[in-house]
Image: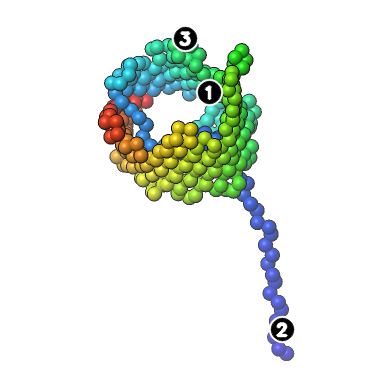
Amino acid sequence: MGNVLYPAPVLRRGPRREEPLANPGSFDELHRKCKEVFPQQMEGVKLIVNKALSSHFQVSHTIHMSTIGQSNYHLNATYVGDQQTSPTEGFPTLIGDIDTAGSLNAQALLLLAERIRTKAVFQTQQSRFMTWQFDAEYRGDDYTATLTLGNPDLISESVIVVAHFLQSMTSRLVLGGEMVYHRRPGEEGAIVTLAGKYTALKWVATLNLGYGGAHASYYHRANDQIQVGVEFEANTRLQDTSFAFGYQLSLPQASMVFKGFLDSNWCVGAVLEKKLPPLPVTLALGAFLNHWKNRFHCGFSIIVG
């Protein structure tokens, strides 16, 4: 008898399980990756001493001797509670900063529920209140909604209301928007801005587009040592546009980080940071030059702790 051939069994694959989308984070952090590449402005001489008094309480002393404005001293105190939502976040968080002129900057962050966060910000200039702001943020599985009240005044009937919403469309694409409403005697208006962010393996592209203008940024990580960022901003009210290019070079073996930037206003600048292990000391040296206005300033800072 000949061999009998039976049809090979067909393996049926079950439906592919899609991974749940992640939370997109806060609206204010859309351009954070790109902005971290650019160096921070610095001038004069600054000494910062950080001291952890306990696992929850930390204070810092800052002495700034300026060559442009007035020299000052800042005392900063930070308290972080026991509710840890991530390695870098803890609730409640209380932050206070006061200088020699009596100006105060205070913040309070509370976790009302697992998904609801609130923040209150108060700023004074000497004995005068300048800013009081209240935020409420709800973080869903794949979206974030935020409502902000700025300088509410029932007597003069003035207020600034800002609403943010971000939605993760895919694992790489985030879309959302912002609405800013302001009201004061004799004036009332609103501005709507759309936002989008695409995150790839080594680069991040972000765009904010609205009636008031546009803000686009691009961040690229070439390797473990080199990162670059490009920013473009256009303001329709001021009829002004600007372009900036920044880069960061990290040398872990030398405990050094170098940041530099160049923009369309003919400004160049760079900051070099050097850690001195095993001592808890960081040295920073920066220089900035505005070719258009022929202005140059440099700075030096020492961070202890």
Task: Say which residue label 2 marks.
Answer: 4
Q: Quadrant of residue 250?
A: top left
Q: SS for tag 1?
A: strand
* In front of the other: 97 or 298: 298
Residue 137, given in percent of the width and then of the height, sits at: 60, 30
Q: How is the image coloured?
A: rainbow
Q: Which mark is residue 181?
A: none
Q: Crowding at label 2, few (<14), some or many (≥20) Cα neighbours within 10 Å?
A: few
Mark 2 → mark 1, Cα distance in angstroms: 76 Å
Compared across the picture, whether 297 is left or right of 55 comes to: left
- Where is mark 1, residue-wise? 93
How far is mark 3 from mark 1, CA to CA?
Answer: 25 Å
- Residue 300, relative to residue 3: is it above or below? above
Q: Position of residue 66 (x, y in %)?
A: 30, 20
Q: Earlier in the sequence, mark 2 or mark 1?
A: 2
Residue extending farthest to the bottom is 1
Q: Label for residue 127? A: 3
Q: Based on the displayed image, in which of its 4 quarters is residue 257 positioned?
A: top left
Q: Amino acid at mark 2?
A: Val
User: Residue at the spot x=48%, y=45% of the render?
Assistant: 205
Q: Is residue 14 left or right of residue 257?
A: right
Looking at the image, tell me whether mark 2 or mark 3 is earlier in sequence order.
2
